[in-house]
Amino acid sequence: MNKKQRANLIMVRLSEKYANPPIPLYHINEFTLLIAVLLSAQSTDKKVNELTPNLFKNGQTAKELYDFGEQNIYNCIKQLGLAKTKSRNIYKLSEIIMIKHKNIVPKNIDALEALPGVGHKTASVVMAQAFGVPTFPVDTHIHRLAQRWELSKGKNVKETETDLKKIFPEKKWNILHLQMIFYGREYCTARGCDGRVCELCKEMFPLRRKSVICTKA
């Protein structure tokens, strides 16, 4: 099975499992999605979702979170990794959005990446899921699957993103980003599959030598 055939099979099988995948982070609007994605760096979505309802109860716009204050933001998220840095970045970016962008999240990837604490992946997620602009944000799950499914030899997520954009049609990028994340979490996990265990890996690579490996997710 060549790369194009694998890509087509992946789109079919993931659509069968996740026809309408939800955004896994709790949010209310474009601004709260931005904050939730920023908070998810080096933290689990589950933990972020436990803490953001209380944070967003106190602020759902840049002005509201800026008025809430850096210390109060920290108090809401202090259980997360890098909480002090994240609270400082949220406070600063809230000020920038409030003043420079008139309290509206910019619909521009360069403007998003210019905000404190917002990297390429975070900006890409917001562009895709808040504004519907085709992007292909690559996290650790997608990077792992791209390597395992022999779609990319990228040494980092940016190279992998470039490779995946060449393989899959642009209209599928946003949904595939979510589908691959869910599949990587549920089936083709870091320790539960090495490219020979999950259904999709076995279907794509039937000649890979079978072995018994750890199946703990």
Image (cartoon, helix red, strand yellow):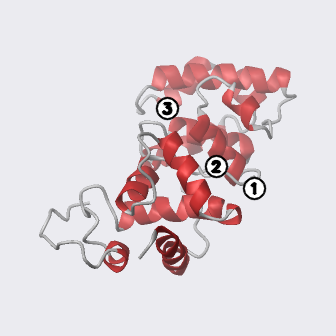
Report how far apart the C-alphas of labels 2 and 1 lie in the structure. 16 Å
Residue sitting at x 35%, y 80%: 203
Q: Earlier along the polypeptide chain: callout 2 or callout 1?
A: 2
Residue 8 is drawn in which quadrant?
bottom right
Q: Which residue is mark 3?
A: 77
Q: Which mark is residue 27?
A: 2
Query: Is residue 178 depicted above or below 49 in this figure?
Result: below
> In front: mark 3 or mark 1?
1
Q: Secondary structure at mark 2?
A: loop
Tell which of 124 and 206 is nearer to you. 206
Nearer to us in this view, 51 or 158: 158
Q: Are marks 2 and 1 in contact (CB under 8 Å)?
A: no
Quarter in which the N terminus is drawn: bottom left
Q: Left or right? Give the position of 163 relative to 155.
A: right
Callouts 3 and 1 close, C-beta under 8 Å:
no
Please determine whether, in this image, residue 51 is positioned above or below residue 19: above
